Amino acid sequence: MSTLVAGSCGLCATWGRVTGMGVCAVCREEVYRMRRGTMAEGVCRRCGWTTVLASDSTCRCCRTVVRLGEDEQWLAAELQRRELPSGRPLQLALGIEGL
């Protein structure tokens, strides 16, 4: 079992508990999925961060921002199948266990 310490995740930059690998618990699972070939590392097409990407080529932080409705312009472009340039703003997240 890995030790959890407070810090910033090396992949998604979320502040909270990180494992001995230097990543949060969610990204740790994504790293394992990446090693199995179900996820890939690359540049997020929304924010430009190099990290583990989902099948839509976006990082976990960007998916969270869009799902919370904090970037309506991006969501509208997605629905209209238009491309917006990367470099969209990204709010750093705080990971609180249980939330």
Image (tube, rainbow, N blue to C red):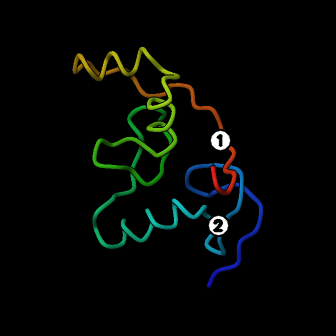
What kind of element bears circle 1? loop
Work out whether 18 lies above or below 98: below
Q: Which residue is mark 2?
A: 22
Left or right: 56 as drawn, with respect to 30: left
Front tag of 1 and 2: 1
Label 2 neighbour load within 10 Å: few <14, some 14-19, many 20+: some
Q: Residue at x 33, y 15 (%)?
A: 76
| Residue tagged 1 | 93
Q: Nearer the viewer, residue 86 or 8?
A: 8
Among all residues in the image, which is located at the extreme front?
A: 98
For this view, does 96 lie left or right of residue 37? right
Is the residue 33 above or below the residue 86 in the image?
below
Vertical relation: 66 (above or below) 55? above
Q: Position of residue 18 (x, y in %)?
A: 67, 64
Q: Position of residue 32 (x, y in %)?
A: 42, 71
Q: Residue at x 48, y 48 (%)?
A: 50
Identified by mark 2, the residue type is Gly
Q: Which picture quadrant has residue 4?
A: bottom right
- Amino acid at the residue labelled 1: Ala
Q: Secondary structure at mark 2?
A: loop
Q: Which mark is residue 53?
A: none
Which residue is outermost to the bottom?
1
**Residue at mark 1 to residue at mark 2: CA–CA distance:** 16 Å
Please report the residue visible at 61 percent of the width from the left and 58 percent of the height from the top: 10
